[in-house]
Image (tube, rainbow, N blue to C red):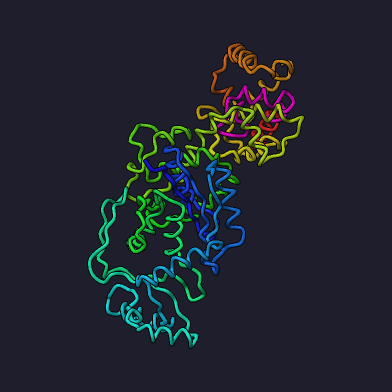
C-alpha cells in the first residue's frame, strides 16, 4: 500500500483562521492515523495579496496546537522554474495556449455573459490563433497569459470521499489561466504540480475548492499523472447559518491562546465540525482523535460553529488540569507574587470547575484583591429574611469570628464545624446565617463554598468583608 502523504497548503494572505486550522487538523490526523507524512506548503504565488507576518503566524499557530509537520514549510515562490517547466510541456503538447486578450475585453465578455444569464468563462477567442499569429504577437511584445485548453466535448468525473461521484460537462469548465502575464503560476497550476511532485496521496481541503477540482483533474490527465484521492470538507458557518465571522466568536487561530483556551480543547471542538465519530462521546484526547478519525465519517452538511459549545468544552479540559498546571498557565494572564501564591492556589482551585477560559482567572483575582466589593446590599438578605434580621445576624457572625483562631482558617472543615455549632447555639437557620456570610465573604450571589473562601482569604480579610457588608446593609 502506498504511503499516505497529505499537505496543508495555506495562502499567506492573512493569519490562520479557524476553518484553515480545521483543514490542517484533518490532514494531520489522517497522516498520523496512517503513519504517513504531513507537509506544510505555503502557496504564496499571489504576491500582491501577501500579508506581512502571515507565514510566521501559520507556523506559530501549528506549533501551539501541536500539529507538527514532517516537511516544510515549502514556499511556492521558490519553485517557479518547476512550474515553468511543466507549463512549457503543456504548451508543447497542445494542452495549453497563449491568450492575448486584454483585461478590458475579458471584462466586456463577462458583462455580456452576465446580461444573458450565461456561465461566466473565457470565450476561447485565442484558442484558434495560428502559430504565426502567436509568434508575431510575442515578437511585438504583446502581454499574454497561458491558458489550459479544456476539451470542448465530453465530461470530467471524479470520486470525492465526502461528496461522492461528481461529473461536470467540459463545456462548463473554464480555460483556466495557468501562467500569468508576469510568468508567475496561478494557484491551479502550482497546486497540481506540487501535489504530484510531493507524491500527495490525499487532497483534503475546503469545500470552496470543489468547483476547481475538474480543472485539476484535466491537468492530471494531460500530464498522465495518477490522481490523488479528493476529500472536500464542508463549510463552517455561524449558528445563524451565515458566513463565519468574529461576531460568532470566530477569531484567528492563535487568538484563542490569548483568550485563555487550551489547544487540546480547540482541536477537540473543531474536529467535531463536520466529522461525526458515530459514538456517544464528545471529549477526545489527541490519541483518541487519531485512532477514531476517518475521512469516510466527514459529513456533507455545513458545520455550525457554536462559541458556547467551545466554552463548555474548554471548561471540561480546565477541570481536568492539575492545580499546578492551571496556576502555571495563568501566569500568561496574571503576575502572581510569591507571597500570594498560596492564596491564589486556593482561590483558583475553588473556581476551577467554573472556569470556561483561563483568562477568567484575571477577573477572579481582581475581584478578590479589592479592599471592598461592589454589590447591591439587598443581595445580603435571604429570600425569606429581612434587612433588620440580617443586620443582627451579621453582627453576631462578626462577634463570633473575632474569637476564632487564625489556625482554624487553615482548615475549612474546622470553620464549617464552628459555624454549625454557632447556628445551633443561637437557634438560627442555615440559610439565615450562611447566605449573608457567603455574599459578604465573596461579594457574589453565586460563588464557591464559603468556608473554603474564608480559608483562602484568612481571618483579617474575612472580617474586613463582613464588616463592610454590615455597613452596606445598615446604610440601606
Between residues 263 and 295, which one lies in front from this camera angle?
295
What x and y, as percent, mark residue 125? 33, 82
Magenta span includes 375: no
Q: Is residue 397 left or right of residue 174?
A: right
Q: Residue at x 38, y 53 (%)?
A: 235
Nearer to the camera, 135 or 9: 135
Above or below, comparing residue 359 to residue 182 in the picture: above
295 to the left or right of 29: left
Q: Is residue 454 magenta?
A: yes
Q: Residue furthest right?
A: 339
Q: Quadrant of residue 226?
A: bottom left
Magenta part of the protein: which range?
A: 436-465
Q: Residue at x 42, y 82 (%)?
A: 100
Query: Which image quadrant is residue 397 in?
Result: top right
Above or below for 165 versus 469: below
For residue 33, say whether it is visible.
Answer: yes
Amino acid at each position: 500500500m502506498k504511503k499516505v502523504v497529505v499537505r496543508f497548503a495555506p495562502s499567506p494572505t492573512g493569519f490562520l483562521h479557524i476553518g484553515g486550522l480545521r483543514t490542517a487538523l484533518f490532514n494531520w490526523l489522517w497522516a498520523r492515523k496512517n503513519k504517513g507524512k504531513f507537509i506544510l506548503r505555503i502557496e504564496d504565488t499571489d504576491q500582491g495579496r501577501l500579508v506581512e507576518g502571515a507565514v510566521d503566524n501559520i507556523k506559530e499557530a501549528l506549533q501551539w496546537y501541536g500539529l507538527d509537520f514532517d516537511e516544510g514549510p515549502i514556499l511556492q515562490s521558490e519553485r517557479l522554474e518547476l512550474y515553468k517547466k511543466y507549463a512549457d510541456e503543456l504548451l508543447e503538447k497542445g494542452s495549453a495556449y497563449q491568450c492575448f486578450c486584454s483585461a478590458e475585453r475579458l471584462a466586456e465578455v463577462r458583462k455580456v455573459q452576465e446580461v444573458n444569464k450565461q456561465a461566466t468563462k473565457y470565450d476561447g477567442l485565442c484558442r484558434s490563433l495560428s502559430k504565426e499569429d502567436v509568434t508575431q504577437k510575442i515578437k511585438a511584445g504583446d502581454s499574454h497569459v497561458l491558458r489550459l485548453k479544456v476539451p470542448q466535448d465530453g465530461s470530467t468525473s471524479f470520486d470525492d470521499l465526502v461528496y461522492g461521484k461528481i461529473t461536470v460537462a467540459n463545456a462548463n469548465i473554464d480555460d483556466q489561466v495557468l501562467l500569468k502575464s508576469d510568468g508567475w503560476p496561478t494557484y491551479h497550476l502550482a497546486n497540481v504540480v506540487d501535489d504530484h511532485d510531493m507524491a500527495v496521496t490525499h487532497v483534503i481541503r475546503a469545500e470552496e475548492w470543489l468547483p476547481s477540482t475538474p480543472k485539476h483533474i484535466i491537468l492530471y490527465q494531460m500530464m498522465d499523472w495518477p490522481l490523488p484521492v479528493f476529500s472536500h470538507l464542508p463549510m463552517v458557518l455561524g449558528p445563524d447559518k451565515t458566513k463565519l465571522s468574529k461576531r460568532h466568536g470566530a477569531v484567528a487561530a492563535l487568538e484563542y491562546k490569548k483568550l485563555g483556551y487550551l489547544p487540546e480543547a480547540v482541536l477537540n471542538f473543531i474536529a467535531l465540525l463536520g466529522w461525526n465519530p458515530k459514538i456517544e462521546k464528545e471529549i477526545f484526547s489527541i490519541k483518541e482523535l487519531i485512532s477514531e478519525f476517518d475521512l469516510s465519517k466527514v459529513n456533507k452538511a455545513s458545520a455550525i460553529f457554536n462559541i458556547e459549545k467551545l466554552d463548555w468544552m474548554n471548561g471540561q479540559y480546565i477541570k481536568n488540569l492539575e492545580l499546578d498546571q492551571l496556576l502555571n498557565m495563568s501566569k500568561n494572564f496574571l503576575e502572581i507574587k510569591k507571597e500570594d501564591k498560596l492564596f491564589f492556589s486556593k482561590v483558583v482551585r475553588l473556581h476551577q470547575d467554573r472556569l470556561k477560559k483561563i483568562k477568567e482567572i484575571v477577573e477572579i483575582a481582581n475581584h478578590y484583591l479589592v479592599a471592598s466589593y461592589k454589590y447591591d446590599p439587598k443581595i445580603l438578605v435571604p429570600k425569606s429574611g429581612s434587612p433588620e434580621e440580617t443586620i443582627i445576624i451579621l453582627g453576631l457572625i462578626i462577634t463570633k469570628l473575632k474569637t476564632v483562631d487564625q489556625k482554624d482558617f487553615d482548615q475549612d472543615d474546622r470553620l464549617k464545624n464552628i459555624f454549625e455549632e454557632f447556628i445551633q447555639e443561637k437557634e438560627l437557620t442555615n440559610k439565615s446565617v450562611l447566605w449573608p456570610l457567603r455574599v459578604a465573604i465573596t461579594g457574589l450571589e453565586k460563588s464557591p463554598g464559603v468556608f473554603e473562601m474564608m480559608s483562602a482569604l484568612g481571618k483579617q480579610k474575612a472580617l474586613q468583608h463582613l464588616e463592610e457588608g454590615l455597613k452596606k446593609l445598615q446604610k440601606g
